[in-house]
Amino acid sequence: MKKILFTLSLAASAIVFNSCEELDDDFYRVIAIDSRCEEFSFEPTPANPKRNILIEDFTGHLCPNCPTAAETAKDLEEANNGQVIVMAIHPGGSGFTSTTALAGFTYDFSTEGGTEIDDVFGASGDGLPIGMINRRTFNGDLLLGNSKWVGAVEALKPLPAMSYLEVQARFQEDDDSIICIDTKIDLLADYDADLIMFTSVVEDSIVKFQKNGAATIEDYIHMHVLRDTPLGAFGIPVGSAPYTANDEFIQRVSLVKGNDWVPKNLKVISYIYDKNTNEILQVAENHVEIE
């Protein structure tokens, strides 16, 4: 059965708001969508979809070892034909992400949502670079140095997918400051725990300074940079358990593009996770379509 999740109408002012509301001591938001955003059409769910894997790469432009981790993530992404997706989170307050008086490092990629995620999981407290792979433990550890990412990804690849996700995004036709996003969630199996839906905008190919060991790379290409979390740092509920195979949900949201974002380099990453364990069960990404 198809269900539309948490869709509210927003007046034509195109100002997208999120009124924060705590539910059961978690961090969820009531979502509004620009009323001019048209619904997307989705293709039928393919037969036997893979379970995709998210690498959350906690990083920073002042982190001297972070380019090595970024290369590990890039290699895994390129070697796995779309099954591995990367999100680079620059957590605020880590000492590696803020603006400084150091020449060239006058920008800050940290976001409110990324910093909240870091605070909850304590990633930067373990030192950067550090990562999570579908927020699943590997050899007893949740937070993994990049030398362990390959093994964690290989352990996850054979696991069956319990759901299929497809995300579509475009700039609003009459207002190119608004990004409209729809995500389809199709359950492939029964599931007994509550599910949470998360959506983010990331940007590729940002050329800025980056520490690399003792050196500084002035034209470093920052990839997968988390820019915004329009459903909040921890998303919103997808109905409630128990779920039945073939349940289908559509989550709609919109947001205002940042002034310095380059439209052609923007992608949307959506995922669902188990509320009880925080494990990411499925993830999808797509470029933001430009009209």
Image: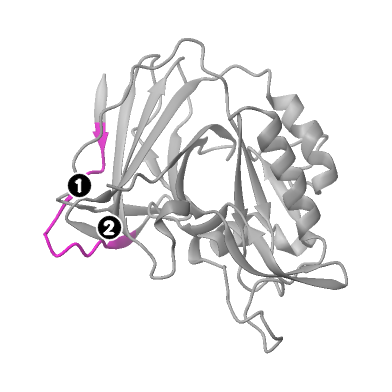
Give whichever of discs 1 and 2 has the lower sequence position: 1
Residue projecting furthest to the left: 12
Disc 1 residue type (three-letter): Cys
The structure residue drawn at horizontal position 59% and vertical position 36%, both measured from the top left corner, is 279
Residue 280, visible in the rendered structure: yes
Tell me which corner region of the image, top left, top right, bottom left or bottom right, holds residue 154: top right
Identify the image quadrant of the N terminus.
Answer: top left
Question: To which residue does mark 2 refer?
Answer: 178
The x and y percentages for residue 237 are 38, 40
Give the residue type at disc 2: Ile
> 47 or 287, which is in the foreground?
287
Q: Secondary structure at mark 1?
A: loop
- The dot on residue 175 is none
Please tell me which residue lies in front, 197 or 284: 284
Give the residue displayed 47% in from the left and 53% down from the top. 265
Q: Are marks 1 and 2 in contact (CB under 8 Å)?
A: yes
Q: Is residue 89 magenta?
A: no
- Among the 4 quarters of the image, the one containing residue 219: bottom right
Q: Residue 38 placed where, x, y %?
A: 18, 41
What is the secondary structure assignment of the residue under circle 2? strand
Q: Is residue 16 magenta?
A: yes
What's drawn in magenta, residue-wise?
Answer: 4-20
In terms of image quadrants, where is residue 4? Answer: top left
Q: Which residue is mark 1?
A: 37
